[in-house]
């Protein structure tokens, strides 16, 4: 309750910081905010060119020439959001050490700012992706709205994980290095560039233990097949995400004071 | 109801034996503690009633900054509690959180938001912040092109834009030039008069003495002494002095009497000047130009056109030596007809304390001076410049009409001229009065 109140009181600072991050990123560039669009756009174009034209990859049971690139974008862009958010959370306390140590303001503002920044970036990317799907005529239709609950679940998972790692990273800097490695393995253990069905059965069982697997599969099912995800398959991840989020907040709460001494 | 109540405050930092100790302790919290507590503050209790000022003094590492951090809430106390009533402004790190790539204006908004203000509230104060910081067109330039002084000025202006109920000041003000320090202290005094509670930390005992009515002396994390500023400061100074000297306080007393000098030949200068001025003890005072845009007020019937320190021949001085004769010339323009005009000045030190001053009232008492419209008039004050401790000083000049007790101010210019004393060795007190003679002699022997 008090956290929400603090965030509300400091909403001016939070919104201002979000605005300023975007401004500062493109302040001294000629093209300014266009870079915000150009970067993800080039990413989508590369996938499309390489995989649908050069390598001519096909997804079994899907014969549109853009099928694979849409499949790839569905997983890769959302994974990108996940990794971006966790990465920001991992370093947010260290990067804002000066502010936290010297000025008395609610520390909870920092994760909120990081979430908003990453979220806005992702919304830009997502709208470009939707535009791309409309352009190539593979727009899945109104079923697309179902990615919202899946995204919320993903944000919960990322925040819980990020908060835990962010706090631990203040005390044990090894966590940051370790997590960069973990993230790489994690990426390949998630069916992003390959469909889950293409794996042998024993490998599918391992990949299914990964909490990100049902989420990415859900995106792919919505975007590529135009079908709602199997909600039941998301339940374990949902439980895990909520527990992790609670743990992260608990850790933050009990270690906040000590964290300031350590920074 | 006290404005600040600090009860049994204590702060300890954890020190782990090795890098792994913390990990082991976290993973297995049931075993023995693998850290030691290093106490930097212990058993700190005090309260400050609203409108009062408390000074905190102590040597480096005594825990002053930690105490301020605990009070402002950036650091969590290990023991005890801090309670404060009202809005708090802390001038701990001026310019913290300024982003070099953003303009001054944007940074002002950002800094104010960090204080919990909203953008529209900030915009209300923007004009006032700009005028106080006096950075002119730089306000719309990125902060990275600012000088450090400009950054501090802007930061101070933001932090004090809204009068706080409690103002907490660290050594932050020791940066910035003399002119700025004058303005800052003037503002702090103004807050004090309007009822703000002040918490002031400094090594500079003169500042504490002049601003605070109560003081706390921190030593090694505990309160060594607390009470009336004067008492605490005297004890503190004594302890520092004893430490520096490392000799027993007992000194042998010679039977010395200060002879009252007989009125010999009228000696105008301090008898030591000829000697002192040839040594590095010379009290060199640098004088700056008349500050045309200095802050001023009044009904505008007269305008001070210049204020200048001159030698006896009327030539402007850029350097003077403490103890020498100088003339302070104040010239003003009457914008309307003025009857019985008074011109006055006051010299203030950087803390805004009035050191000395005078006016033309008594000198012109029997024959009041009237000035016609659009006429310039000038008054000269001829005096021996006192010896001044190192620091900056400002001359306030004023033109008024009426009597000493009852007058209307036409123009009152704060800080019309600045001067800076570069070497105040051997000056005791706020100012050193040029001595006519100093002697020491044996009078008689006393048999015991």
Image (spheres, rainbow, N blue to C red):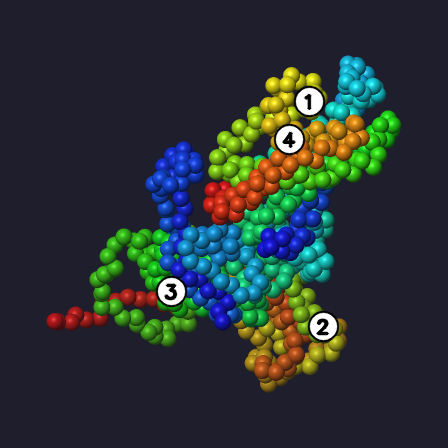
Q: Which is more foreground, mark 4 or mark 3?
A: 4
The image shows residue A41 at horizontal and vertical percentages of: 78, 29
Q: Are marks 4 and 3 on the same chain?
A: no
Q: CA distance from mark 1 to mark 4?
A: 12 Å
The quarter of the picture where the C terminus of chain B appears is bottom left
Q: Chain of mark 2?
A: B
Pick whichever, B413 or A135, lies toward us.
A135
For the point 47% across and 45% down, which residue is it? A258
Q: What is the spatial separation of the Cα atoms under label 2 and label 4, in whole angstroms?
A: 75 Å
Label 1 neighbour load within 10 Å: few <14, some 14-19, many 20+: some
Q: Please report, as a chain letter, where disc 1 is located.
A: A
Q: How many marks?
A: 4
- Residue at mark 4 to residue at mark 3: CA–CA distance: 61 Å
Q: Are marks 1 and 3 on the same chain?
A: no
Q: Which residue is mark 3?
A: B226
| Residue ID for mark 2 | B300
Q: Nearer the viewer, mark 3 or mark 2?
A: 3
In the rendered image, which residue does mark 1 sit on?
A: A196
Chain for numbered disc 3: B
* Mark 1 secondary-structure assignment: helix
**Do residues under tags 3 and 2 come within 8 Å of each other at their CB atoms?**
no
Residues behind callouts 3 and 2 on a single chain: yes
Q: Nearer the viewer, mark 1 or mark 3?
A: 1
- Dot 3 crowding, Cα within 10 Å, few <14, some 14–19, many 20+: some
State left or right for residue B448 relative to residue B27.
left
Residue located beneath label 4 in the image: A212
* Relative side of A62 to A84, left or right: right
Residue B326 visible? The answer is no
Indicate left or right for B3 with A26 as reference: left
Which label is found at residue A261?
none
């Amino acid at each position: 309750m008090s956290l929400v109140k603090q965030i509300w009181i400091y909403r001016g600072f939070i919104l201002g910081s979000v605005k300023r991050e975007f401004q500062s990123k493109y302040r001294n560039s000629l093209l300014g905010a266009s870079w915000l669009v150009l970067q993800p756009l080039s990413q989508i174009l590369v996938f499309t060119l390489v995989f649908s034209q050069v390598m001519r990859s096909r997804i079994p049971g899907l014969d549109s020439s853009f099928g694979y690139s849409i499949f790839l974008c569905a997983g890769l862009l959302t994974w990108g959001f996940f990794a971006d958010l966790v990465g920001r959370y991992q370093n947010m306390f260290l990067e804002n050490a000066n502010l936290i140590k010297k000025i008395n303001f609610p520390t909870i503002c920092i994760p909120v700012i990081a979430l908003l920044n990453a979220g806005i970036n992702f919304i830009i990317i997502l709208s470009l992706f939707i535009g791309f799907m409309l352009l190539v005529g593979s727009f899945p239709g109104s079923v697309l709205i179902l990615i919202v609950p899946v995204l919320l679940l993903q944000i919960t998972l990322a925040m819980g994980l990020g908060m835990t790692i962010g706090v631990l990273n203040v005390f044990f800097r090894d966590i940051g290095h370790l997590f960069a490695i973990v993230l790489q393995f994690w990426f390949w253990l998630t069916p992003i560039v390959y469909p889950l069905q293409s794996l042998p059965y024993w490998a599918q069982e391992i990949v299914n233990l990964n909490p990100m697997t049902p989420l990415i599969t859900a995106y792919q099912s919505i975007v590529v097949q135009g079908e709602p995800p199997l909600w039941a398959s998301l339940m374990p991840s949902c439980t895990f995400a909520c527990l992790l989020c609670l743990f992260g907040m608990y850790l933050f709460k009990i270690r906040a004071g000590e964290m300031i001494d350590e920074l | 109801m006290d404005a600040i109540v600090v009860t049994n405050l204590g702060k300890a930092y954890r020190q782990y034996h090795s890098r792994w100790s913390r990990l082991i302790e976290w993973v297995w919290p049931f075993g023995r503690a693998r850290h030691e507590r290093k106490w930097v503050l212990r058993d700190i209790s005090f309260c400050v009633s609203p409108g009062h000022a408390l000074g905190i003094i102590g040597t480096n590492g005594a825990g002053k900054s930690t105490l301020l951090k605990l009070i402002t809430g950036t650091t969590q106390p290990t023991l005890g509690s801090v309670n404060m009533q009202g809005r708090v402004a802390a001038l701990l790190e001026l310019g913290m959180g300024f982003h070099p790539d953003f303009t001054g204006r944007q940074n002002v908004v950002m800094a104010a938001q960090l204080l919990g203000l909203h953008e529209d509230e900030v915009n209300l104060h923007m004009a006032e912040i700009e005028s106080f910081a006096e950075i002119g067109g730089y306000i719309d330039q990125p902060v990275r092109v600012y000088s450090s002084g400009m950054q501090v000025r802007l930061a101070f202006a933001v932090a004090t834009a809204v009068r706080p109920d409690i103002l907490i000041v660290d050594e932050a003000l020791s940066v910035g030039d003399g002119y700025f320090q004058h303005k800052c202290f003037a503002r702090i005094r103004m807050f004090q008069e309007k009822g703000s509670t002040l918490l002031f930390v400094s090594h500079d005992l003169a500042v504490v003495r002049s601003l605070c009515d109560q003081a706390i002396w921190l030593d090694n994390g505990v309160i060594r002494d607390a009470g009336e500023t004067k008492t605490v400061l005297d004890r503190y100074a004594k302890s520092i002095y004893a430490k520096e000297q490392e000799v027993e306080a007992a000194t042998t007393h010679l039977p010395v009497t200060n002879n009252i000098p007989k009125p010999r030949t009228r000696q105008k200068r301090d008898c030591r000047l000829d000697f002192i001025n040839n040594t590095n003890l010379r009290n060199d005072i640098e004088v700056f130009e008349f500050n045309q845009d200095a802050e001023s007020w009044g009904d505008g019937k007269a305008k001070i056109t210049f204020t200048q320190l001159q030698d006896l021949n009327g030539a402007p001085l850029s350097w003077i030596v403490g103890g020498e004769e100088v003339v302070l010339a104040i010239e003003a323009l009457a914008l309307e007809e003025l009857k019985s005009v008074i011109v006055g000045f006051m010299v203030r030190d950087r803390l805004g304390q009035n050191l000395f001053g005078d006016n033309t009232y008594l000198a012109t008492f029997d024959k009041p001076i009237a000035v016609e419209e659009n006429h310039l008039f000038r008054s000269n004050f001829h005096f021996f410049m006192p010896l001044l401790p190192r620091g900056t000083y400002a001359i306030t000049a004023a033109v008024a009409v009426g009597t000493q007790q009852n007058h209307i101010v036409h123009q009152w210019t704060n800080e019309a001229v600045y001067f800076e004393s570069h070497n105040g060795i051997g000056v005791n007190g706020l100012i050193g009065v040029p001595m006519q003679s100093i002697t020491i002699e044996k009078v008689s022997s006393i048999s015991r």
